Image: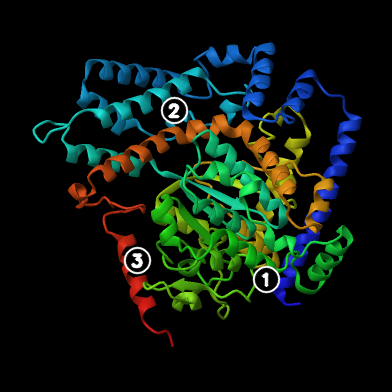
Amino acid sequence: MTKEEEDRAFSAWLSLFIAGLLDWIRWIWGNTHSKTPLQVLSAQLKTSESYQEYVGRADVIDQYYEFDVWRQQQPSRKYDWQLLRGRVDAMARARQNGDLSALVEGLRSGLLRNLGNLASKELHKKAFVGTKFLIEEYIAEVCASLRYLSQVPTTDSTPNSAQRKFNFFRETRQSFGRTALILQGGTVFGLFHLGVIKALHEQNTLPRIIAGHTVGALIAALVCIHTDDELPSFLSSQAIDLSAFRDRSGSSWAQLYRKLTRLITKGVLLDVKVLERCVADNVGDTTFEEAYKRTKRILNITISGGAGAEESGLLNYLTAPNVLIRTAALASLGTDKVELLAKEEDGTVVPWDLAYSYRKRPSTPKKSISAESPYTRITELFNVNHFIVSQARPYLAPFLSSDSSDLHKHHTLLPSILRLAALEIKHRLQQLDSLGLLPARVRRFVVDEYVPSQGDPVVIVPALYASDAGKMWRNPTKEMIEYFVLKGERATWPALALIDVRLRIELTLDRIFLEIKEQDEAAFAMPREGVEDSEGSSNGTPKIAAKVIITRKLRAQSVT
């Protein structure tokens, strides 16, 4: 086996070991410690079949323990309630009086994602549904004020001219920042991401920027080629074409033998050729640029093995506009047998000229883990300052501080112990890396999993058990997809209130900006100085546009 195949085999065996060990610890803990009534009621939430059922059960808990009373009480040391109260009253008063100048000034000066610490996770650990009513009132008032400004009639002679309105929403959207959804995790557990996306989409909190690695890249590709209207039907198991796997079906023992042999000899569980056919059946020959123009979703696929920060292996509609998504998703799995393909203007599919940038190079001086992470580039390209991470790697699940199913487990001892162990392991790995002593195999996993810490990312982790490990040895089926989709939804529901507080203003700004831009895009073609009129960020110079032009010119040239 090659070194990469050994790494993948190591990852798979580690997943099995950790899943079994975690299940054993849970069993011992559950049988040696009596459960409180709160723990019994919260455990019932995990059996909910829909978000409406989850909210209904959570409301009962909040009322029984008077958590709803806590939500009504505005004063708290955990956030600046007086600041929020003052801004809510000021915006409402300006809107009622039609004072556009005061409303615009108030939004410009104080529109922050974590104003007064309102986005703190601590404010979502008390009640099982929602947070302080004052925070929810502030979010609602800001969104109402933004919609009010967007709907005010404009003329060139008024202070609220069409050009000024466009500039206001563009600049405000730029300063507020954006959120990216990161899908991490491999093997069949990657189907869990579909449930996370379904839960976010149903509550209108799905970010437009989505990135994926390994199986997460396959899921991200499937999602980003569908519009909002198409997603509900796609996220049902019936819409995914699994005919490639049916041709390789057989008895459970036959599937187990094939996968075990493949894992030992090649380091992978799934047949790459079968997986390639499955991706082609569902994605087709769509390119990154075509997907963006059709859905307005920004797909990012990371590929391991790039050399340096400028070649971090991040493919999207800016860095690789004409690359076929299906080849990028397969390359993200880490196999050297996949060739990156691109589509010419006449529709001809050819090898991508710039693929050499992502092949392995001779060893170079190591940079910090944060500098090598492809997600760091996402923050630079698309002005991202907040992340939602869907993590489906079972060997990392016990050591992650989850903001989904474990949100209210601060009342128990075991999650605190695991979080402490995770922080200690992370600290020791950083020390070894700074000294250049971190083994290459371990360092690769750390770089792949690193997500910039700005904005305090929301982490969603599935509740995986030893019984789920058996599904690694079977080919995906409609029933298996339904199982993991529901598992992903259940893991996401507890975090939806936190995500809504952090994303509602951002998504409102984004929606209004796109609506205004589409109404008369030609009238606002020239951006003001220092503001980039694109999906990317800007500090006064059009870096993104220049990079696209350079990339296309290079692709047009022959590479020797």
Q: Which mark is residue 116?
A: 2
The amino acid pointed to by label 3 is Val
The amino acid pointed to by label 2 is Gly
What residue is at 59 percent from the left and 62 percent from the top?
281
Quote the CA–CA distance across marks 1 and 3. 32 Å
Tag in front: 2 or 3: 3
- Residue at the bottom extreme, as displayed: 560
Q: Quadrant of the N terminus?
A: bottom right
What residue is at 48 percent from the left and 42 percent from the top?
229
Q: Quadrant of the C terminus?
A: bottom left
Q: State the image coordinates of residue 382 (x, y, percent, origin top left).
A: 40, 52
Q: Which mark is residue 514?
A: none
Q: Dot 3 corresponds to which residue? A: 548
For the residue pair 404 and 113, the one nearer the viewer reads as 404
| Marks 2,1: beta carbons within 8 A | no
| Marks 2,3: beta carbons within 8 A | no
The amino acid pointed to by label 1 is Lys
